[in-house]
Image (cartoon, grey):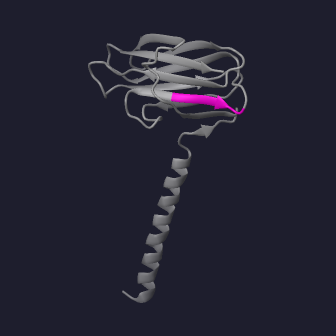
Amino acid sequence: MNVTKCSAQVVGKILVAALLTSLFLVSGAAALPCKTAGGIAVAPADDVSDRVELIRSVGGTIHPGEYQTIWKSVPSGVRTIVVNLDWSGHQHSGTDSLALTITPPGSSVLGPYRDGVDGRMDEKISLALSGSDYLPSGTWKFLIFGEDVPEEGTDYTLNVIYYY
């Protein structure tokens, strides 16, 4: 092999490595935290499932391929909302998958979010939503999807905490 062909192969390998590295960096940049077109920042939150001061909690059972919608009224003056969807603690731990999509009033859809979006694979989705000013008041929509759950369903709890 002559020097020209060898150099071309080395340059080609370097270009491929650079391209893969840039794709990795761009995909990492798209991960949380981010700000949506509506100006709402979404970031991982601490697990809030065991806190006593929960003020808005809903539980249910979701089945394969099922969508369940939960509507929550958010008052004016709220600066941060912490959302925790928890489906842990069942007999087939680590195998179920739920997805959460959040739609604030008058804003674009946030999500869908899945386990691990908060940096932990624990069958919980814990997110903090905040804005540069107040979050939109009114009725927020929380859409839960039973992505990969057993036929008998999976129990879940959705906790929503407001901070002024």
Q: In which quarter of the image is residue 17?
A: bottom left
Q: In this view, does 113 lie to the left or right of 134?
A: left
Magenta-highlighted residues: 127-132
* Main secondary structure found in the magenta portion: strand
x and y percentages locating residue 132 in the rendered image: 71, 33
Residue at 49 percent of width and 54 percent of height: 24
Q: In which quarter of the image is residue 34?
A: top right
Q: In this view, does 4 lie to the left or right of 136?
A: left
x and y percentages locating residue 11 in the rendered image: 47, 76
Residue at 48 percent of width and 60 percent of height: 21
Residue at 64 percent of width and 30 percent of height: 130
Q: In this view, does 35 lie to the left or right of 83?
A: right
Is residue 137 magenta-colored? no
Q: Is residue 78 left or right of residue 148?
A: right
Q: With respect to residue 27, does 51 lie above or below?
A: above
x and y percentages locating residue 57 in the rendered image: 50, 12
Q: Residue most toward the front?
A: 52
Residue at 47 percent of width and 35 percent of height: 117
32 vs 2, nearest the viewer = 32
Q: With respect to residue 62, does 3 lie above or below?
A: below
Q: Quadrant of residue 111?
A: top right
37 vs 6, nearest the viewer = 37
The quadrant of the rendering that contains the C terminus is top right
Q: Residue most toward the bottom?
A: 2
Number of numbered callouts drawn: 0
x and y percentages locating residue 104 in the rendered image: 65, 22
The quadrant of the rendering that contains the N terminus is bottom left
